Image (cartoon, grey):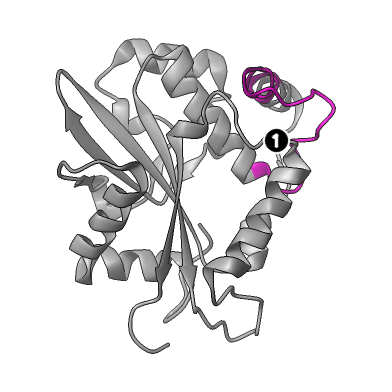
Amino acid sequence: MAKMGKDHGSEYHLRRYLTEARAQLSEAVQLSIQHVGAVMWITPEGDKEWKGMRFLSDDPLVAEKWKKFWPQRGNPPNWDAIARLDTGDRPEWLLLEAKANHPEFCSPPSGALGSSKDTIRKALGRTKHYLGVHRDFPWLGTYYQHANRLACLYFLNIIADVPARLIFVYFMGDRFPDSRRCPQTEAEWHKLIESCHSTLGLPQKHNLSDRIHEVFLPVLGTI
């Protein structure tokens, strides 16, 4: 998620939903995953974004596997919000990534260097193989953020055996002071999403398709 603006940006709009329209946000998530149970939002300590797998800090086995899968130096994937579904014996985690404009959706390339970059490249390679993506598609460049979120989803469900879903929240109707492109409709977002999937070489259906969901929400109030 990009840096929060005073009255614009994905962080601003997501926080407004979480504080002013949490029931509406929960309902949209429930519809996207076709789940009727309660969505329990987990607030990180200090009200900051969750980083990496810290929301599973009470599970040392997951932490150890994560250390082998992803570099522990630098900035790990940050989650805009995390929620939990209590489904029987094991909870299911919902990892949210919110977007409100075109530039932040594209995201810059990976800034990792040396051994960290090698570790990330290996993790992305394993994810690509599992999803049926040809190894020649570059995942360290444009849409790197989208790619590393897929890698985290792969890690949780396949390597760590932790049930998890990835929820992309796309806000419609934002306005930025610098006039950057902000999709106003769901159709506009779909065009950008298709471009992302094409660049990353993602097939329409893959092994984690049923674990990835999209939620389209109008911004609250008048910007």
Instruction: Please name whichever residue, 122 or 129, is drawn nearer the observer in this view of the structure.
Output: 129
Q: Looking at the image, which residue is at 60% across and 44% down?
A: 146
Q: Position of residue 157 (x, y in %)?
A: 43, 20
Amino acid type of the residue that numbered disc 1 sits on in the rendered structure: Ala
Instruction: Please name whichever residue, 215 or 104, is drawn nearer the observer in this view of the structure.
Output: 215
Asked whether the viewer can see residue 73, the reply is: no
Q: Position of residue 49 (x, y in %)?
A: 38, 49
Q: Which residues are magenta?
A: 122-144
Q: Horizontal placement of 132 versus 52: left or right? A: right
Q: Position of residue 220 (x, y in %)?
A: 34, 78
Q: Looking at the image, which residue is at 29% across and 25% down?
A: 57
Q: Circle 1 — which element?
A: loop
**Quarter-wise, where is residue 164 in the image?**
top left
Q: In the picture shown, does residue 215 fall above or below 159?
A: below
Instruction: Please name whichever residue, 22 or 62, is drawn nearer the observer in this view of the structure.
Output: 22
Neighbor class of circle 1 (other Cα within 10 Å; few <14, some 14-19, many 20+) is some
Q: In the picture shown, does residue 118 fall above or below 112?
A: above
Q: In the picture shown, does residue 213 fall above or below 60?
A: below
Asked whether the viewer can see residue 133, the reply is: yes
- As drawn, the residue found furthest toward the right would be 136
- As drawn, the residue found furthest toward the bottom would be 222
Q: Looking at the image, which residue is at 53% across and 67% down?
A: 186
Q: Is 17 one of the magenta-colored residues?
A: no
Q: Position of residue 187 (x, y in %)?
A: 59, 67
Which residue position is annotated with label 1?
112
